[in-house]
Image: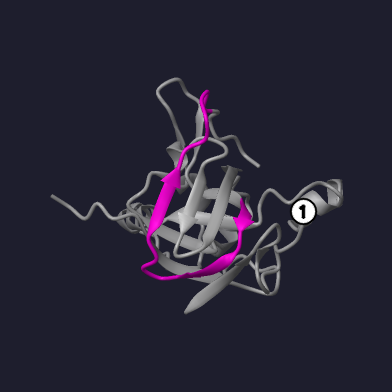
Amino acid sequence: MGDKRIYVTSVSSSGVHEFSKQTKGHIQLLTGLGVEGDAHMGVTVKHRSRVAVDPTQPNLRQVHIIHEELFDELTEKGFSVSPGDMGENIATRGIDLLSLPQGTRLHIGAEAIVEVTGLRNPCKQIDNFQKGLLHAVLDKDADGGLIRKAGIMGIVSRGGRVQRDDAIRIELPPLPHLKLERV
């Protein structure tokens, strides 16, 4: 029987708009804003392509969370991906992030709560990091629908310190559950 723990495997942030983020000993989540000192922190959208469309839209992408199992899958396909490389703030193990419904609350560590808003929509920048990686993080379901495997996005409902090995507790929203869409 394997490890059934749900936990944080790494945390990362960057104060500049770069594809990858630097791993840290801990990050501080700020209620309604995101990761302290991160380029994507704020009440309104910070992703440059979205700012160009409407800089006043709410920031539903304050925190990027990725499942470390994806790194394992990518390694098997010949890629070299380490924590922070794909721009995530938090990497996890033991949870199928992509199957969570919208509005799921992830209680991380002693205090922090991140509310899941949707799927990360990987863009062509990912191929600038490693050629072919965009195709590797996309898949098709049985009905031919697109599966985006590059993690999920969320907003900070309650701030707190997050670090490696912090436990994660999942609080599902009330029914009916809504499937994650790209944000």
Q: Is residue 98 left or right of residue 50?
A: left
| Residue positioned most to the bottom | 25
Q: Which residues are magenta?
A: 155-177
- In the image, residue 106 sits, relative to residue 24, either above or below, namely above
Asked where in the image residue 103 lies, by quadrant, the reply is: top right
Give the residue furthest to the front.
111
Q: Quadrant of the C terminus?
A: top right
Count of labels in the image: 1
State the image coordinates of residue 115 (x, y, percent, origin top left).
Answer: 58, 47
Tell me the SS state at disc 1.
loop
Q: Is residue 159 magenta?
A: yes
Instruction: Classify mark 1: residues with Cα within 10 Å, few (<14), some (14-19) or many (20+).
Output: many
Q: Position of residue 116 (x, y in %)?
A: 56, 45
Residue at the image position 60 percent from the left and 63 percent from the top: 159
As displayed, is residue 42 above or below residue 179?
below
Give above or below for 80 relative to 93.
Answer: below
Residue lying at 56% horizontally and 53% vertically, measured from the top left: 114
Q: Is residue 161 magenta?
A: yes
Residue position for label 1: 45
Residue kind at label 1, given as amino acid type: Val
Q: x, y (%) of residue 138?
A: 49, 41
- Which of the pair 129/168 is nearer the observer? 168
Decide if residue 159 is in sight here: yes
Residue 144 horizontal/vertical position (percent)? 47, 23
Q: Is residue 22 visible?
A: no
